Amino acid sequence: MKKEIRTTCLLNVINYINNLVLITYFSMYQNLNINNNIYVLKLGIVLSIWLLSPLLLLFVTTYPLLNNENLYYKNLKRELIIDVCFKIISYIVLLSYTKTIFLSDIYKLKVVVQIVLMFFSLIINFKIYKKVKYLECNSINIFEEDTVTEIEKRNIENIKKASYIGNTSFLSFIIFGLSLILFSTKEMNWQVDIIATVISSISFVKFINSIYKKSILIYSENNNRNKVFKKEIIYATISYSICIVVSMNLVRIENEIFRYITYLISILALYPIMKNNKNISIKYKKVKKSLVNELMAYYEK
C-alpha cells in the first residue's frame, strides 16, 4: 500500500508540473507571430492533445477512489476526495483566461495557484502515507474479508476476461470515441474530420459490444445481466451524446476551452461503468488470492 501511495504522490507532482509547463506553453503560443500557417496549425493540434494529459493523470490518480470494497480507501476517503478536488481546481485554473500573456500578472497568479495546490496536495499525500504506515505497523487489517463462493472460483477465467475487456474498452472509448468526435473538427480539413468521426463511431459501437460481452461473462442470471447491461448502455449513450451535441455546434460555444470541460463531463458520466469495472477487477484479485491460499494450504498438509 505504501508503494501505491508513493506512486500516486509522484503522479500528482507530475500532474502539477505538467500544468505549469502547459500554462507557460499556452501563454507563449498565444503571442507567437508566425506567418507559416501550417506550423501554427501543428502547434495548435499539439496543444489540443496536450491539454488532455491532465485529464488522463486525473483519471489515473482518481481510479483508486472507486475501490469501495477496500477499507483502506474508506478510511482515507475524505483526504482522497480533497486531493481530487485540488486537481480539478488546478485544471480549471489551467483552462481559465486562455489569452494569458507570458510573465503577466495573470500568468504569475496561475503559476502561484498551481504551486500552492501542489504543496497542499503533497501535504495530504504525506498524511495518507502516515496513516497507512500506522495501520500496517499496528497489524490492522485494512482489507475487508469477503467470502469467495465456489461458483466464483470456477468462473475465475471469465472474471479475468471481463476485467480485461472492461478496462481496455473503457480506455479505448474515452481516447478514440469521445476525444476524436470532440476535437477532430478543430482546425482540421473535412477529410480528417470524416475519418475521425468514423473511428469515433466504431469505437462507440465496440464499447457497447464490450459491455454486452462483459455482462455475459460476469452475470449468470439473465435478470441481473440485462439490468446491468441496460444501465451501462444508457450511461455510455449519454456520455457520447454530450460530445456529439458539442461537436455539431448544436450548443453555441464562444470558447474552444468549453470542449475540454465537455470532455471532462462526458467522462464523469461514465462513472458507474468505471465503478463496475473496478469492482470486477477487485473480485478477480480476491478470487485469485483465495485459490492461491487454498493451493498453499493443500501442499502444507
Image (cartoon, grey):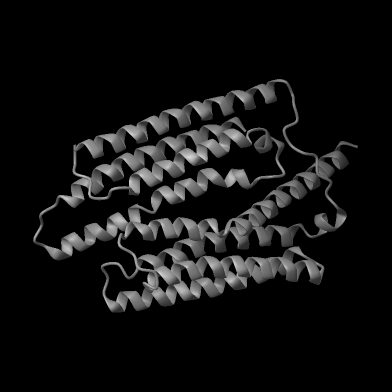
**Quadrant assignment for the N terminus:** top right
Q: Of residues 250 and 120, which is closer to you in this image?
A: 250
Left or right, residue 298 beside residue 99: right
How many numbered discs sit on the rendered protein? 0
Left or right, residue 52 beside residue 129: left
**Quadrant assignment for the C terminus:** top right
Left or right, residue 94 beside residue 9: left
Question: For the point 19% across and 38% down, which residue is it?
Answer: 104
Residue 127 quadrant: top right
Question: For the point 41% across and 47% down, which residue is it?
Answer: 54
Residue 94 quadrant: top left
Where is residue 218 shown, x and y percent of the image?
74, 63
Where is residue 285 shown, x and y percent of the image?
71, 48
Q: Is residue 197 above or below residue 111?
A: below
Where is residue 57 shown, x and y percent of the image?
45, 46
Question: For the point 40% across and 41% down, which residue is it?
Answer: 90
Question: For the point 86% across and 39% down, which residue is it?
Answer: 297
Q: Residue furthest right?
A: 301
Where is residue 97 shown, x and y percent of the image?
28, 48
Left or right, residue 241 beside residue 231: left
Q: Of residues 254 and 58, which is closer to you in this image?
A: 254
Q: Is residue 239 above or below residue 118?
A: below
